[in-house]
Image (cartoon, grey):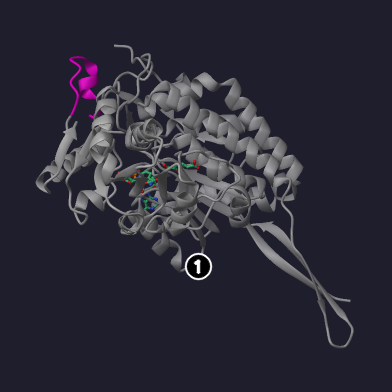
Amino acid sequence: MTERFALPPSLAETRNYVDGAFVATGRTFDNVSPLTGRVLARVHEADAALVDRAVAAARRALDEGPWGRSTVAERAAALHRVADVIERRFDDFLAAEIADTGRPLAQARQLDVYRGVANLRSFADLGKTAHGDFFETHLADGSQLINYTTRKPLGVVASISPWNLPILSLTWKAAPALICGNALVCKPSEETPSSATLIAEAFDEAGVPPGVFNVVHGFGPGSAGEALTTHPGIDAVTFTGESRTGAAIMRAVADGVKEVSFELGGKNAAIVFADCDFDAAVEGVIRSSFTNTGQVCLCSERVYVERPIFERFVAALKARTEALKIGWPDEPDVDLGSLISREHREKVLSYYQLAVEEGATVVTGGGVPHFGDERDGGAFVQPTLWTGLADNARCLNEEVFGPVCHLAPFDSEDEAIRRANASDYGLAASVWTTNLSRAHRVGPRLHVGIVWVNTWFSRDLRTPFGGVKLSGIGREGGRWSLDFYSETSNICIKV
Ligand SMILES: NC(=O)C1=CN([C@@H]2O[C@H](COP(=O)(O)OP(=O)(O)OC[C@H]3O[C@@H](n4cnc5c(N)ncnc54)[C@H](O)[C@@H]3O)[C@@H](O)[C@H]2O)C=CC1
Ligand SMILES: O=C(O)/C=C/C=C(\O)C(=O)O
């Protein structure tokens, strides 16, 4: 049977990209469609020796190749050429992303392919505006010190990215790293190897010198991920994924005292005040809970609603949730695709079960849809709403990473803030209110890296992005990315 969402032909054997060449290793794992469970491609896993070759190639690209001597204008032009190739091959990227992730076409287009292009172009342009600082110091003897700062690349950067937004995540790291003059070894998620390989094809076609951008495929522990993060030749790690994995990577780089930038999990709160624009808040919470089938680190899994509108809000959210269309990515008006894999669905369903055991009322959902066709071999799950859990329930404290949220009433601004902050995570929060003073009061008191008021996941790529507590270390975005991906030196001259 022909796969309805097939990969571009070059990916049937999905290879690594090392030192400007596509490398098969013979040791393969299957890329399985989350829509049907069928095998889409064979992916060539990189062993430690190939990771070593990739790191060595990256180092040579800096020390001996033209990249190490390139100007920021040359690097910006290279990133724009890569973006041109992605735009020209837009449909291949879209097909790869949908095949790997099972997400609706409109979301794959917007969240991943357009955003990938935007990441490349934005950082290409932003890099040209990077500047140093200048300090004049007057000494008692009448002489003077002139201090100025310069930026240098960190060196060889390891990028480890997850499966939920593969093109977004990889380019979000690659573009600023490269504009700052680094070379990269990228390890995409084993669940989503295709778009990273297409990005390598774009770098190849754009004529970026060998070794500057490398892709190695494989898993985490005992595979390419561990080989890369423990490699003594890397200078820094940028990682997006689970908090526990971040901790493992920290341990791996501790002896070498390498720089890390981590964007980790979330258990994000939405706070809906009675003075909100009701319809906008309902739509906002639908988006923030169910976009990408709930597989965005920013999704709201805890929704606190002010008591006077609680019952009405739950009813409205239930009606909207039940109207969401689950289906094939290219069906008109489809809202939810599959989860990433059957394995991840097991995890999500275990929380659906646990919630019941913990005393939740299942307002809607809680199970698996049945289609009566090959999608029943896929990883689909129903969008789900819970109420009635105690604040200390595991389902309210652990990241599910699926299409689910819990709604709880609150009585005061202080209570909402306290309960929103009572989490080991601190990535993002959204606040729904038409009271401007309240928005200003509440936003700064939320212990998270990102607060959205009357919106969610609205992104200006110049702004800082990252989390506190278990949600991460450091900020990326705009000048924060330029700061992370470069080493600042101070030059002090006595005159
Ligand atoms: N907050 C976020 O942005 C994301 C959170 N998650 C959460 O993580 C859970 C598991 O998803 P995974 O993709 O398996 O996340 P993960 O954190 O295990 O994997 C992310 C990346 O890290 C790599 N990796 C794993 N262990 C490693 C190690 N010891 N050393 C080096 N690299 C390693 C993986 O191969 C992958 O490329 C999800 O169920 C979800 O809860 C997943 C993706 C994104
Ligand atoms: O907009 C961004 O830069 C990031 C969005 C989301 C993730 O990184 C994630 O869900 O992993």
**Residue 67, image x and y in percent?**
70, 46
Beta carbon of the mark 1 residue lies under 8 A of ligand 1: no
Mark 1 lies on a secondary structure that is loop
Q: What quarter of the picture does the C terminus occupy?
A: bottom right
**Residue 491 image-quadrant placement:** bottom right
Q: What quarter of the picture does the N terminus occupy?
A: top left
| Residue 375 lies in the magenta stretch | yes
User: Of residues 238 and 231, which is closer to you in this image?
Assistant: 238
Identify the residue at image location x=50%, y=38%: 458
Tell me if residue 226 comes above or below residue 495 in the rendering.
Answer: above
* Amino acid type at image mark 1: Val
Q: In this view, does 87 lie to the left or right of 428?
A: right
Residues packed near mark 1 inside 10 Å, few (<14), some (14 to 19) or many (20 plus): few
Identify the residue at image location x=37%, y=60%: 247
> Range of the magenta residues?
368-382
Identify the residue at image location x=50%, y=44%: 186
**Residue 174, image x and y in percent?**
56, 43
User: Of residues 74 and 261, which is closer to you in this image?
Assistant: 261
Q: How many marks?
A: 1
Q: Is residue 265 left or right of residue 357?
A: right
| Residue 477 lies in the magenta stretch | no
- Judge whether residue 207 can be spotted in this image: no
* Residue on which disc 1 sits: 257
**Residue 330, image x and y in percent?**
38, 16
Q: Which residue lies furthest to the top in this view?
A: 1
User: Of residues 423 and 29, which is closer to you in this image?
Assistant: 423
Q: Overall secondary structure of the magenta stretch? A: loop
Tell me if residue 475 comes above or below residue 331 in the rendering.
Answer: below
**Residue 112, image x and y in percent?**
48, 31
Q: In this view, does 7 lie to the left or right of 481?
A: left
